[in-house]
Amino acid sequence: MTDETIRCGFVAVIGATNAGKSTLVNRLVGTKVSIVSRKVQTTRSLVRGIAMVGASQVIFVDTPGIFAPKRRLDRAMVETAWSGARDADLVALVIDSARGIDDETRRLLDKLSGVGHPKVLVLNKIDIVKRDSLLALADEANKAVPFERTFMVSAADGDGADDFLAYLATQVPSGPWLYPAEEVSDVPLRQLAAEITREKLFERLHQELPYETTIETEQWTEQKDGSVRIEQTIFVARDSQKKIVIGKGGQAIKAISMAARAEIAEIAERPVHLFLFVKVRENWADDPERYRAMGIEYPRE
């Protein structure tokens, strides 16, 4: 392998909320690096997943869904998404083919036209959309933004994902790898563990809980038997939300803990003892320290 064949670059994956960005990144990387939920705006910070294709290292930046911001946290998430697009070598716009180009995606296309990096279009969820509709959608999007290529994929079953990844491997710049070949993410395991628990929280409670709910891994203790003891705190804004998380007789938090523990153990490749605590932290969305902990900038206005 000569130096000239080695490639490495960043691909920012952007799109409207629930376009399937996190599912696609997990599919391309081959393992979970970003949480997936039916609840919108679950990805908050820039999550990097790493895929090796021959001599190419493709580093995916899964950005928060882009939407019309209403609160301080919303503004921080949207700015984080656009910063990921501006800093990448390529930008991949993921569109939910079933939803089409709605007002949210149209605003995104307008702003994306001002981003100078090469851009590719990814039409996701092709397994549930007729071909004629896909072609019309691709035509409309390409008239709005000059995309280098258009890919049609199903992140859920992997259809088209290999072709998309192979193309990206030829487009990232020549240069040395930034991560070891066996590494799949630069997200610390304790941070990913907190995100997994947040995913299970949303899966269990759906619309009952605001997406501002945050989870922090407070303790990660290696045990002598090779297992790990993890203590996490679920922070909510009000006492009424605390009762929802715990559930009647503790059933909700027990189910959340069991689901999270199983997945964390699979990723950590060791037995896990997970202990969840619920605390009320009022107005945390106005605390700059909380934003730094999530890896996003605190918007001053």
Image (tube, helix red, strand yellow):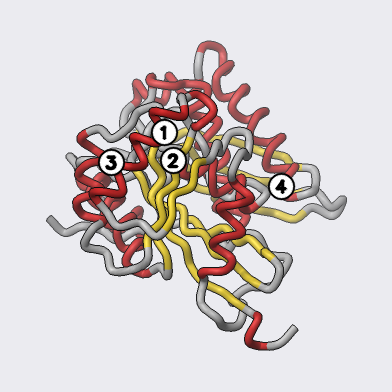
Determine which of the numbered discs, if any, sits on residue 240 in the image: none
- Residue matched to label 1: 134
Name which residue type carries label 3: Glu
Name which residue type carries label 2: Leu
- Element at badge 4? helix
x and y percentages locating residue 172 in the rendered image: 52, 71
- The first of marks 3 and 4 along the sequence is 3
- The first of marks 1 and 3 along the sequence is 1
Marks 4 and 1, how far apart at CA: 36 Å
Name which residue type carries label 1: Leu
Number of marks present in the image shown: 4
Q: Quadrant of the C terminus?
A: bottom left
- Residue matched to label 3: 140
- Element at badge 3? helix
Residue closer to the observer: 55 or 148 = 148
Asked if labels 1 and 2 touch by Cβ distance under 8 angstroms, the answer is: yes
Which residue sits at x=66%, y=88%? 3
- Residue matched to label 2: 123
Which residue ends up furthest to the left in the rendered image?
301
Quarter of the image holding residue 113?
Answer: bottom left
Asked if labels 4 and 3 touch by Cβ distance under 8 angstroms, the answer is: no
